[in-house]
Amino acid sequence: MKIEICGLNQIYPNGNHALKDINLELGTGMFGLLGPNGAGKSSLMRIIVTLMKPTSGVVLVDGLDIQKHREKLRGILGYLPQDFRFFTALKTWEFLDYSGSLAGMKNRKERIAEVDRLLDQVGLLEVRDRKANKLSGGMKRRLGIAQALIGNPRIIVVDEPTTGLDPDERIRFRNILSQLSRNDVIIILSTHIVGDISSTCHGMALLNKGDLVFNGSPENLVKQAEGHVFRMNLSPHEYDIVKEKYNVISTVPVENGWEVQIVSDETPEFRATAVIPNIEDAYVYYMEHKLQAYIID
Ligand code: ADP
């Protein structure tokens, strides 16, 4: 199974050019779509789930144009929108049962069994009889993923699922997603939180102001930053110079000054040592530095 995105543009009526000629191909497994707020992630997700028609370009699922095969696509699609809300005071299991009916599960017995299996999978079985709108924020989000999964979709789209969650819930949510990552489903996870792009993402894309600026594996992104992340111990005076001149990623107080990490294309002065970048460092390098250099070129 694959999704091909070809020459996609989204221009809103007020002139906002939210997606600029996006070309992207996604295979099975988990795909991370990363970018700051306003990058165009939600616009792309809404087009993929056929809630919005692009200004130009096409999205193909296994060669079929999704705009021309909406019904077929909706039958294999699970979607957790960014602003997922409950409109009713249904119990948790009833809400999921209702979602199952909407997803086309007609056999009641099979549906109820699937509801309990999914509630167990997302850790909500104990609260199955609680009113859905009385769940905590993290639980609501987990119920959101359960409703996206019911009916056994083959394309699962989750838009910014960890925004506003505390770190424990974020990890829990990430684990649920990575357990879903099988080779017969495509999972698209959009996020502005770099830490959500885990090693389970086989591929990722970086969007910035509507442009696709990186497409590859998380390891590739990290590789781009190798040799460009440095650590140094600085006196307060040196720190003032460095922060003017370089992109500072982190600052930790130490005896007599600061331990500072920066990204830079050249090896800086001040007794700097190169460190192995992680994905957060690589993201900063890419967004703040490489793209700046690219724009200046
Ligand atoms: P993200 O999900 O990465 O935050 P969005 O796709 O929501 O990005 O937004 C991309 C750009 O399109 C932003 O500049 C945003 O303000 C604009 N935008 C989004 N929705 C609309 C809309 N309905 N009308 C006009 N502009 C919009």
Image (cartoon, helix red, strand yellow):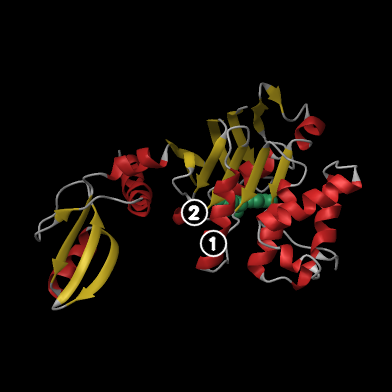
The image shows residue 48 at horizontal and vertical percentages of 67, 38
- Quadrant position of the N terminus in the picture: top right
Q: Which residue ends up furthest to the top in the rendered image?
A: 63
Give residue 196's mark. Answer: 2
Helix, strand, or loop for circle 1? helix
Which x, y percent locates residue 147? Answer: 75, 52
- Please, is residue 137 above or below residue 285 in the view? below
Q: Compared with residue 181, is residue 94 higher up or lower down, i.e. above or below?
A: below
Q: Is residue 258 left or right of residue 44?
A: left
Is 274 left or right of 16, judged from the image as shown?
Answer: left
Image quadrant holding the C terminus, namely top left
Residue 39 seen in the figure: yes
The amino acid beneath tag 2 is Asp
Amino acid residing under circle 1? Arg
Say which residue label 1 marks: 170
The answer to whether marks 1 and 2 mark residues whose Cβ atoms lie closer than 8 Å is yes
Residue situated in front as seen by the camera: 170 or 248: 170
> Where 216 sits versus 288, above or below?
above
Residue at mark 1: C-beta within 8 A of ligand 1: no
Is 280 or 56 nearer to us in this picture?
Answer: 280
The mark that comes first in sequence, 1 or 2, is: 1
Residue 172 in the figure: left or right of residue 195: right
The structure residue drawn at horizontal position 54% and vertical position 33%, both measured from the top left corner, is: 22
Residue 47, position as x, y percentages in the image: 68, 39
Residue at 79% x, 70% y: name it. 130
Pointer 2 local density, CA inside 10 Å: few below 14, some 14–19, many at least 20:
many
Mark linked to residue 273 = none
